[in-house]
Structures are given as structure tokens and as C-alpha cells.
């Protein structure tokens, strides 16, 4: 199992960015996948999650601005982020959960910096 997030970088306030997570060996068995983020001095928080049936849930900060999607054929999880704000600056991590066995997997994060 390997999760690797890509697509972070520097973007101006109001801009957009799309993160990708290459998920090898886990896409078919994960019942839930998601994006989390962590800013310096803060706890890791849920940004968006998506089930294997396609149901989605967003953290309050992401509602109306971010969209999560998954492409099982490409073994990739996405996070489209629009109307970015400086407070969105964080390291973003992708996450996968399996039921049998019950495990949670984390990938290496990708840094998103929103600044003018």
C-alpha cells in the first residue's frame, strides 16, 4: 500500500489548485478515502472524505469551495480547491481506511501555501 499526494504549491488568494493522491494497492479495498490537512500549531483536520459508494462529506472550511473525487481506474484520489484563502495554507495528506483488516493508511503530505 502506498499513498502519495501531489499538486501542492504556492497560489494567490482566490486561486485554485488540484491535489492528486496516487493510491497503489488500496483503491479497491478502501471503504473510505479522504483528505486531511495540518497547519503549524494546529491539529490535523478533516477536509473531505469519500466512500467507496461515492458519498462525500466535507469539513466546514471546505464546504462550497472544495470538491473531492476518486477515479478507481486510475487509482487516484483528487481534491479540487477553489477560492483559496490564506487560512487554507497547510500540509495536505491523503488517507485511506480499510475494514478487513481494519487499518488506516496515510500518505506523505503536500504543502499548499496561499499567499500574495
Image (tube, rainbow, N blue to C red):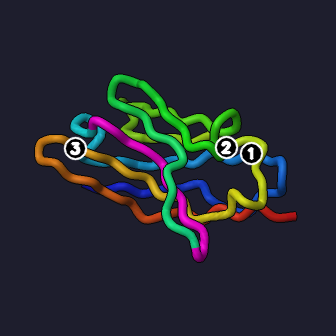
Q: Main secondary structure of the magenta part?
A: strand
Q: Earlier in the sequence, mark 1 or mark 3?
A: 1
Is residue 40 part of the magenta span, yes or no?
yes
Is residue 44 part of the magenta span, yes or no?
no
Q: Earlier in the sequence, mark 1 or mark 2?
A: 1
Q: Which residues are magenta?
A: 31-41
Label disc, if present, on residue 83 of the rendered structure: none
Q: Position of residue 67 (x, y in %)?
A: 60, 35
What residue is drawn where x is 68% and y is 63%? 89
Residue linked to disc 1: 16
Q: Is residue 48 left or right of residue 114?
A: left
Question: Relative to 58, is 7 above or below?
Answer: below
Q: Give the number of callouts.
A: 3
Q: Quadrant of the N terminus?
A: bottom left
Q: Residues within 10 Å of mark 1 (few under 14, many from 20)?
A: some
Residue linked to disc 2: 81
Amino acid at each position: 500500500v502506498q499513498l502519495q499526494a501531489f499538486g501542492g504549491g504556492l497560489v494567490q488568494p482566490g486561486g485554485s489548485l488540484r491535489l492528486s493522491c496516487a493510491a497503489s494497492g488500496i483503491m479497491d479495498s478502501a471503504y473510505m478515502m479522504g483528505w486531511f490537512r495540518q497547519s503549524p500549531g494546529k491539529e490535523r483536520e478533516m477536509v473531505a472524505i469519500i466512500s467507496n459508494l461515492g458519498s462525500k462529506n466535507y469539513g466546514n472550511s471546505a464546504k462550497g469551495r472544495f470538491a473531492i473525487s476518486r477515479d478507481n481506474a486510475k487509482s487516484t484520489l483528487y481534491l479540487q480547491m477553489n477560492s483559496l484563502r490564506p487560512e487554507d495554507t497547510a500540509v495536505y495528506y491523503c488517507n485511506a481506511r480499510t475494514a478487513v483488516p481494519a487499518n488506516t493508511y496515510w500518505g506523505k503530505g503536500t504543502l499548499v501555501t496561499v499567499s500574495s
